[in-house]
Image (spheres, rainbow, N blue to C red):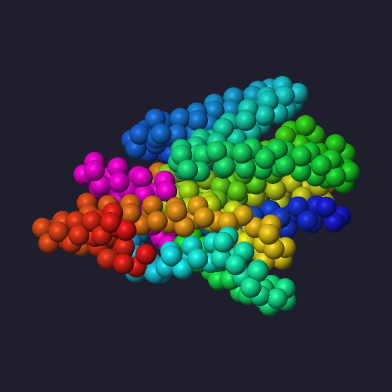
Amino acid sequence: MLFVRYYLWFAPQVLSIVVLIGSVRRGLPRKLPIFFSYLVFTLVQFLTLFTISRMHPFPVLKYRLLLTLGTGINGFLILAVIYEVAEDLLLSRSALALSLRTLLRWTAAMLLLAAAIVSAALSRFDLGRAMNVFQVLDFSTSVVQCGLLLALFLFSHAFHLSWRSPATGVALGFGIDASLELANAAVLALLGRSGFIATDVAGMAAYHVSVLIWLVYVFLPERAPRFAGAGLQKSDIEFWDQEVQRMVRR
Amino acid sequence: MIVPLLVALVGVLALFLIIYLAKGHHATGCDVDALAAQLRPLDVNAFRNLIDEREEKFLRELLPGKEFRRVHRERTLAAVEYVKCAAQNAAILIRLAEAAKQAPDPAVSAAAEKLLDNALRLRLHAFHVVPRLYLGMLVPRTALAPRFVADGYDALTRQVVMLGCLQYPTRGMSSAL
């Protein structure tokens, strides 16, 4: 079990470095700068926490403080990444911008409210302060993250918009991580302290899956929809010219 | 006990829904020619007639109350079908315009961008109109005439023709519309 825990702590970080390299090669820091910053931040956070965990004696308070602070910054960055993905895929389209921006703002506000209510409800099941500030922050971020990503996917589905590979990967990775974290938080609330290690491992596994998805999408060639068939011919131009004239006359 | 179980269930459902929706985006992203074949013909003039307020007023004066409500309901249901068909065609045109946007010719790309913008606008309007039409069916005189759907569809058809003029493979789409 110890090996699995260490593997799940280290492997996603190593894979994140590969994702970062792939992102740079594909020019993602220009397209999705906040996602790039998020990856860099998670690596810095990991290195800091790992260094502290190696200290003797182990500074528990300092570790927890940094973990909570990191979770807060992480949550903020994740929401910014979702906004960045939404801006790139949906909000940049002038026909949808106004309606969807308003709808997304309302969705985010409702999700924040829901996160606050459910956090309060879950904390009643908490035994021995298992549900501390870190967990509330983590859970609230997961609720908002999951809801916003679902809304984004549903909007795109409703408008039949195709998503480009890296953005879909980013959204899918965060979506899987957030939904599993939601389920995880509920299990932790049910089990209390005894379930802490199991849910911690499950949370790390969810993040591992997310990083693997980003890795696949970063190296996957982009599949733009294309027409099949030959090029423009003179007869076609004449045909369409007649069509245009007929339409204009109508 | 119930709240954590509900949260866990929501998490698992969200997971499956996200995977399903993300998969859908890729599955329909490539075969554009097959999409063009799915376009359904739509008689815009017949649709205009269905949503014409003068026509409705005329029927109201001509028919007894019960008969008018029956005819009005049938006309509204037919209008809903037209709007759904227009929305479906707009969805297909969104995909086609996305594909045409990749064209190296800037004229084709610009025409596709315009088509995409209008197709999105039409689909957005259709989402607003369908509930209004149903409301109008239940409570006559409350529905707002969805004239802009017909106008938007007309404009869209012209843009498809323009795009077709610029790029070979969309030939024949205007006849389907």
**Residue under the image location 35 percent in, 34 percent down:** A27
Secondary structure mostly seen in magenta is helix
Direction from residue A192 to residue A176 in the image, left or right? left
**Residue under the image location 18 percent in, 62 percent down:** A239
Q: Is residue A240 above or below residue A129?
A: below
Pick the residue in front: A216 or B56: B56
Q: Exactly how many numbered labels are in the figure?
A: 0
Pick the residue in front: A224 or A67: A224
Pick the residue in front: B91 or A208: B91
Q: Is residue A32 above or below residue B71?
A: above
Q: x, y percentage for residue A29?
A: 41, 31
Q: Is residue B33 visible?
A: no
Pick the residue in front: B50 or B117: B50
Q: Is residue A22 visible?
A: yes
Direction from residue B10 to residue B39 in the image, left or right? left
Residue B107 found in image quarter: top left
**Residue under the image location 41 percent in, 34 percent down:** A31
Q: x, y percentage for residue B66?
A: 72, 76
Direction from residue A199 to residue B28 in the image, left or right? left
Direction from residue A20 to residue A242 in the image, left or right? left
Q: x, y percentage for residue B103?
A: 25, 48
Which residue is the extreme one toward the front? B61
**Residue under the image location 28 percent in, 56 percent down:** A249
Q: Is residue B51 magenta?
A: no
Which residue is the extreme one toward the left? A234
In the image, the segment drawn in magenta is: B89-118
Q: x, y percentage for residue B36?
A: 34, 65
Q: Is residue A161 above or below residue A37?
A: below
Q: Is residue B107 magenta?
A: yes
Q: Which quarter of the rendered picture does the C terminus of chain A lie within?
A: bottom left
